[in-house]
Amino acid sequence: MMTLLALACLLAGCAAAGVAPTGNNPDSPSAPKDGPDDEPDSPPAPVEARLLQTTNETVAADNSVACVSTQTASNSWYRVFSLAEAGITGAFNVSKITFAVETSTNELPLTVKVGSYAGTPNDTAPLDLAQASFLANTTAAVANTAAAVVIDVPITATIPAGSQVIVEITSTDRTTAGDVFFLGTTSGPFQHTNYLLSTECGLIVPTAMASVCAGCGASQAIISVTGTH
């Protein structure tokens, strides 16, 4: 481990006996029109999309970065996804967050948050949490594991059109030696970086991974957001 620190009803009039309705009779019913204007347009079906910034979703061994002493301190991992970059022009309805775990021992449920981010991350500067509006939060249980696992977390939130989606995953502060939690990461290509915050190691703002430590830029958290638009 790197240990940093939607009926159409057509009504046809029937002629009365012995009376032939004509188009000149104002009391005769109008024949229904043919064509697409007969029925209202149905709204388009929602389209599912998955926001992801890492090309390789295989968890790399001994690649995660977290603040550790003899046990893991509280760490928060962040990713920010641009709706515009994903070609999403309307609101985005989040339904699930997925993340990977490298290893976990006696970890209490993680805290998972999602919301919108008004800033513009540049992959090198820290995130400004004053620009974040978290709209939903939940917890995710993590079983003891020494093998990589993937966890789906149902969570709902509507991200306004034109916004960016921010995800925060936080582990607990540990007091027992040997208790560890490492988020699953990849050392492969990525679109944008993730960020790490851990006050116990002096990271008092979400810091771009390459700025956390030498070589830490290769530790990219595997986090995705699924929703519809």
Image (spheres, rainbow, N blue to C red):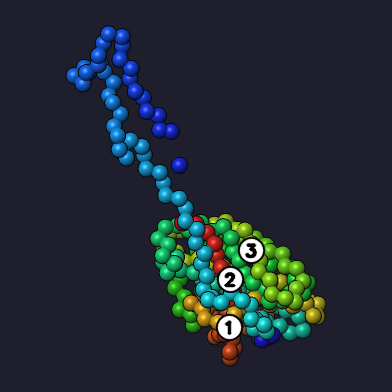
State which mark lies toward you, 2 or 1. 1
Per the model, the C-alpha gap separating discs 1 and 3 is 22 Å
The residue shown at (30%, 29%) is 32
Say which element carries label 3.
strand
The answer to which image quadrant residue 23 occupies is top left
Q: What residue is pinned by disc 3?
A: 152
Q: Residues within 10 Å of mark 1 (few under 14, many from 20)?
A: many
Residue type of the residue flagged with mark 2: Ile
Residue 161: x and y, percent? Answer: 43, 59
Residue 222, placed above or below residue 202: above
Per the model, the C-alpha gap separating discs 2 and 3 is 10 Å
Q: Nearer the viewer, residue 142 or 28?
A: 28
Q: What residue is pinned by disc 1?
A: 187
Mark earlier in primary sequence (2, 1): 1
Say which element carries label 1.
loop
Residue type of the residue flagged with mark 1: Ser
